Amino acid sequence: MKTIRFPIVKFVVSLGAAITGCFFLVYLLDVWFDGVMATFLYNNFVGVNYYYTETGEMYTTEYIVLSRVYWALLILLLILVCGILFTLFLVSYRQRKKQETATILEAGKLIQYLTQHPDTAVDQLPMQYAEITAQMVSLNASMERQKRLLQEEAQRKSDLITYLAHDLKTPLTSVIGYLSLLEEVPQLPEEQKEKYTKIALDKALRLERLINEFFDITRYNLHEMVLETQTFDLCYLLRQLVEEFYPLMQQKGCFIQLQIPESLPIQGDPDKLARVFQNLLKNAASYSYPNSPILLTAMEQGDSIRLTVENQGKTIPPYRLESIFEKFFRLDESRSTDSGGAGLGLAIAREIVTLHSGSIEATSQQEHTVFTVILPKKQG
């Protein structure tokens, strides 16, 4: 009741002061200007009748002109009502401003308290702030979780760069050693030369893979992806990728089985979508059992296209499956560069799919891992 009564009292006091001020102003005007107000009222609201006697003498009678008084009172009433409304508006506006300022200050104190005491905020703050307290606690927890993920990502990146820098020395040393041996001992048997040449080539290729991983890390951090959308046949793209991956699959002892229709028109960036499936197929080849199939399927699903890449390999634990799309995350704990790269392939794939307004997820059970990609047929 206090919050209601207080503005009413202020309004009544303000109105009384305004009316008193008006009367006082009228009085001052009448005094300062030698009865100008009295003269004005007499000239406008008093009428005069003139009479003549039989002797020709004139006399007068005065009377109040009621019609003029009526309109004057009506105008005054309108002015008064407008004044009341204006005064009420000013009072309410000022009161609202004070409440808004108080609310902002109180919210600032509340946020500061929640930031400094996130664990005890729910129990310590008043019940009327329960909803905003819960939201702030949730936001604070989300920010802490995001901070922790960024720290883990930075640590994984730092560890990966350290490992790669260390691993670069071994193949480089081998390449230099075998090439130096071939140069210093030219009379080596042909079989031994071929053996040393092959070893040097293998080490050089390994060195190239490591350097490419460094480039992947740099490009991912500095390059902002922009889609160049066009309409193309997704099935034609998948067939091309299967042909390109044939040598790698032969090397890994795997083979790709295609289950796709004749044609699947789609709007998107063909180069970037090709990279998505390149990364998925590389990942499948790296973690597949030898001589096992990799199943690549595509089908229409309403206004979308559903694609899956399935391979047979070790089941991925659920706790690791949740982190599989994070940057610099690698399933291979031994950090062997032969299985898994810089841990960017799946993260880049997710980013590209997200830019296409699609989704990507992974499931793994009973030694079967399936990556599912959903893409809309049309963009925008």
Image (tube, rainbow, N blue to C red):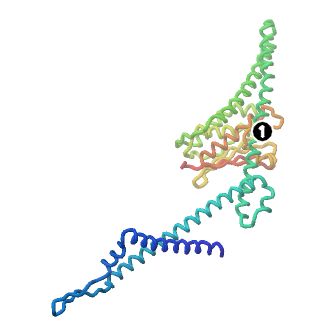
Where residue 131 sits, quadrant-wise, is: bottom right
Where residue 191 sits, quadrant-wise, is: top right
Residue 255: x percent and y percent?
72, 37
Residue 22: x percent and y percent?
45, 72
Residue 62: x percent and y percent?
29, 86
Give the left or right position of residue 51, taking residue 316 as reference. Answer: left
Residue 344: x percent and y percent?
71, 37
For label 1, the crowd category at 10 Å Cα-Cα, with few meaning under 14, some 14 to 19 and many 20 or more, is many
* Direction top: furthest residue: 187
Mark 1 highlights which residue? 330
User: From where the camera sits, is residue 84 visible?
Assistant: no
* Direction bottom: furthest residue: 54
Give the left or right position of residue 42, taking residue 310 as reference. Answer: left
Q: Quadrant of the N terminus?
A: bottom right
Q: Is residue 230 above or below residue 78?
A: above
Q: So how many labels did they put on this image? A: 1
Which three-letter amino acid code belongs to the residue tagged 1?
Answer: Arg
User: From where the camera sits, is residue 348 visible?
Assistant: yes
Closer to us: 243 or 93: 93
Q: Report the residue at 77% width, 24% height from top.
A: 168
Q: Is residue 146 above or below residue 165?
A: below
Q: Report the residue at 54% width, 49% height from top.
A: 380
Q: Is residue 87 above or below residue 240?
A: below
Give the left or right position of residue 68, taking residue 200 as reference. Answer: left
Closer to us: 192 or 356: 356
* Direction left: furthest residue: 55
Closer to us: 14 or 343: 14
Which element is circle 1 on?
A: loop
Q: Report the residue at 32% width, 83% height from top.
A: 67
